[in-house]
Amino acid sequence: MDQQPAFFPADDGLWEQYDQLATRAYGHAIGDITHLREHADLRVAVRDGRVVAGGLGLLVGQFFGGVPVPSACLGDGCVAPEERGDHLAADLARERLRPLIERGAVISAVVTSSTGYARRLGWEAPTSVFAWTVATDDLRNSFADDGFEVEHGLTGGTAALQRDLASRWNGPVHRPSWWTRWKQDKSNLTGYRFARSGHPAAGLLSLTTQRHERHGMGLVVHDFWADSRAVASAMMAFLGRHNTRARTITFRRGALPPDPTLLHGLRHHRTTADAWHPWMLRILDIPEAIRLRGWPTELTTAVPIEIEGETGGRERWLLSIEAGAAEIVPTRVRGQVTFTQRQLAVWYAGGYRSTTSARMDGVNAVSERALAALLHSTAQYEPWLPDHF
């Protein structure tokens, strides 16, 4: 009888075995297993001397409320086809999280097509994710550059600009210094900087191209960061100038922020939206996740809430917010709002934009006023995760 799998941090030999397993499980090579070797933690499950499952983990910050919160971002996980069906993925998720929690992670993000399985393990999607495709001629005929200069290369303050813009949403990664180089090398990205003459960078764009077999190229946008509608329009116009070589522009999943620039700016609504599997969030340490997050400075409130535990039952908490800080402590007071663990993650990310959407997702509240106050506390910024891992 085969022995139970054991879990290990990967040494050089286990890295190589996992690379081979991932290629077999996914049906193609996974470049990140090579590119992220210096930065990621790899945990593998070994049975009878063979790697049968594994996955990468990154400890990075994710912006929530304008502040980076330590997050365990899990990527490139898989289980050998012959090992599936025995809940190995659940054990693997626990083992992948453990070292990242020990290093300070209080939340976790994952992007997976197995959304139902991730939900059973405690993750939830705070928002929908789309990829957009639009005719290059439509961009060219609909948007104007309005005096912005375009510079090839991501220099001259673009890293600081990206960090500032990322902090205005809930979810983007607080990119470490190696992040941009990893993405450029992995996807062969070309970057552009947008600014008015004599002014700091106002927008940045990164894209990749792929030659068509007969003529022209495909063009895919990976980064689209703009600090105003004017520069976003200039960036759209610049993409439209690729019309002699590319028939369409594709904004890869999550690349476009959830604002109306594209759809409201087009003269003809001929876009194609493809829904993708979403990014999902899990709260690992409720008190610390609340303490480390940013909060509206003008809001003062105290709301008793109840949170359904992972093993059943409900825990009562008192959430207090004042002067841009918050804490949550145990209480005996009956909660006015009840969250499941997954609903808590959606609320944390600002995914509930109204009391109606929260109630439609099953959030229970005995006080409409308390529910509205809770939603207001995290809805200052919208959820958006353009980063891939």
Image: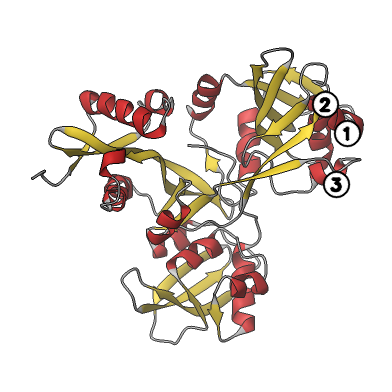
Residue 265 versus residue 154 in the image, above or below: below
State the residue in front, 48 or 126.
48
> What residue does disc 3 label?
264
Q: Which residue is mark 2?
A: 240
Residue 133, quarter of picture: top right
Q: Identify which amino acid the numbered label 3 is placed on.
A: His
Q: Is residue 116 left or right of residue 347?
A: left
What type is the residue that disc 1 sits on? Answer: Phe
- Where in the figure is residue 110, as x and y percent of width and height? 45, 47
Q: Earlier in the sequence, mark 2 or mark 1?
A: 1
* Label 1 Cα neighbours within 10 Å, binned few <14 / some 14-19 / many ≥20: many
- Place residue 159 in its image quadrant: top right
Residue 143 numbered mark, or none: 1
Q: Is 271 placed left or right of 170 in the picture? A: right
Element marked by disc 1? loop
Coordinates of residue 367 in the picture (x, y in percent): 59, 85
What quarter of the picture does the N terminus occupy?
top left
